[in-house]
Amino acid sequence: MEKFQLEISRNSSYPTILQQPKEIGNFSQKPPHLPSEIVTEILSRLPVKSLLKFKCVSKAWLSLISCPEFIKTHLKIASNDPNFSRHRIMFTISEPRFNLKTCSLRSFLYEPSTDAVKIGYPGRNPRTFVRVVGSCNGLICIAITENNFILWNPSVRKYKKLPNVNVAIKPRPCVQYGFGFDEANEDYKVVGIFGRYENLGRYKTVVKVYSLKNNSWRRIEDFKGGAPRDDMGKFANGKLHWFASPWVVHTSSRWDIVSLDLGSEIYGTVEQPNYGEGDFFAVILGVLGGCICVLCNYQLTRADVWVLKDYGVQESWTKVFSIPYIDEPEKYVSSRPLCILLNGEVLWALGSSFVVYNPKENSFRFPNISKLNDFLEVNTYIESLVLPAADSGR
Amino acid sequence: MSSSTELTEKKVFLLKSLDGVIFEVEESVAVQLEVIRELIEGDCARPFISLYNVTSEILALVIEYCKHHAETCSGGTSATIADEDLKTFDNEFMNVDENILLELCSAADYLDIKSLFELTCRTLASLIKDRTIIEVRKMFNVENDFSVVEEKAVRKEFAWAFK
């Protein structure tokens, strides 16, 4: 179809009589034939489950739905949906047994009540620890025991078990992890920081990076910036971020944000916002709307949420919320903002419960979730077609 | 230009459909069609424009949509009320026969009306998401070119998606 097949009258004077219809078409009887670009646009707005089903429609549909370009477009539309229709929440549960549960983020935010449902995950063993390292483009990296990782897309039910990572550190090291996407190389990477304290409080590390493309672990430069505090690195702007304490851990109350660029594998630091006056404690790192954020607790009064709107520009740290305490202060130590809603509200995980805070009205609401007791951690992920395989596109 | 001339001389365009029906629309409505906006900006818009590929039935609907959106956006109402109003209008507007929806989607693409294209694509997607393979083939005029064995194999990989 020619897009600009317009005929422009050379005569600029208006016809005086509007013509009557020559004949009313009967096109409503039979479906019109749509060009393939339009079919692609419609399909890229479908949920993953429907698309997997529609692979059976024809050979052309099968190859369309499987092709990396389509997977990318579908992912982009799903990520940008302001109502979070294609986002889900994943809860890591440790009591009474290890388990993962999920629910739709949209219904959690907007429906009167939502059920958390158990999700079978690869390598599941109720007695063995499971942690979610991170999620990116619909892929989730889970750790089952300390050196056993799995890349998994729960929406298509496909997974890949990573080769074991061997690190010769005795005694047993502390481990911090991270998972993200290296855009330059179109590669998914898992990072493991294995460390232990040596004399004088020095923290020695061995850092290994797994590349999905190469399906192997490789050692990179040791961690720069002391001892990372966060278990799981926070992925934003192509980099993983950890709060870390420089060198001598017990004498320092200073924390830096240390980044690791997944493309260049170079470490850096991110300047922090000016937290202002006050007795603040428990500064927590997170990601909000694709940007790095920090939550800063002020003893017994409030928590401020700062977002780094323009990565690399210290002046762009913006205080987006200041949330007054409504619960026991201990819960705030592990609280974190999860997402910002269209109307400006923010969803906030607080201990094992959730609140939605409306900064304009300074009001709170409490979304209702059933079949969920205490959970260890919470993550959000997107429903996508991205496969945990080297050639899946992103 | 003084405001009095603006009031008396509203620029209008005449749009001619495939089946020869001519619609008179104001500039504020016409510019919602990106193809026409570009013509106006390039200063090559004549007041009489023939639109191939769009029948009068569909063009009438497209103009109704653009008119409502133009009026709501220029009216003095607050952004939230205008948003709500457009949402209600869009929902009702999408309550049509699905073949008309397909035509509207195709017209929105041809005339380059981004909001209508997005709306029709989203509506069609939610309409088909729970349909069977056979229903979808019929709706999109797609012939099944799989052999029985091939189709079975594809279906087997994601059998759970059919439940």
Image (spheres, rainbow, N blue to C red):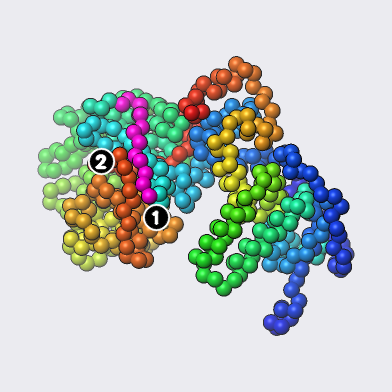
Give residue A7's quadrant in the image.
Answer: bottom right
State the image coordinates of residue A192 (x, y, percent, origin top left): 29, 35
Residue A216 against residue A107 in the figure, above or below = above
Foreground residue among A92 and B64: B64
Left or right, A133 with reference to A263? left
Chain that bears disc 2: A
Main SS type for the magenta part?
Answer: loop
Is residue A381 visible in this depiction of the protein?
yes
Q: Residues within 10 Å of mark 2 (few under 14, many from 20)?
A: few
Q: Residue at point 82% right, 62% down?
A: B48
Q: Residue at point 48% right, 34% down?
A: A386
Instruction: Name the mark on residue A340.
Output: 1
A179 magenta-colored: no
Q: Residue at point 18% right, 30% down?
A: A172
State the image coordinates of residue A271 (x, y, percent, origin top left): 31, 56
Q: Amino acid at mark 1?
A: Ile
Q: Amino acid at mark 2?
A: Asn
Q: Secondary structure at mark 1?
A: strand
Span colored in magenta: A112-124
Left or right, A205 with reference to B92? left
Is residue A262 visible in this depiction of the protein?
no
Determine which residue is flagged by label 2: A373
Left or right, A251 with reference to A334? left
Looking at this view, name the residue that lies furthest to the top.
B149
Residue A257 against residue A274 in the figure, above or below = above
Foreground residue among A122 and B70: B70
Label whose residue precedes the other's in the sequence (2 or 1): 1
Q: Residues within 10 Å of mark 1 (few under 14, many from 20)?
A: some
Q: Residue at point 32% right, 25% down?
A: A123
Residue B40 against residue A74 in the figure, above or below = below
State the image coordinates of residue A133 (x, y, percent, origin top left): 32, 37
**Number of numbered tags placed on the structure image:** 2
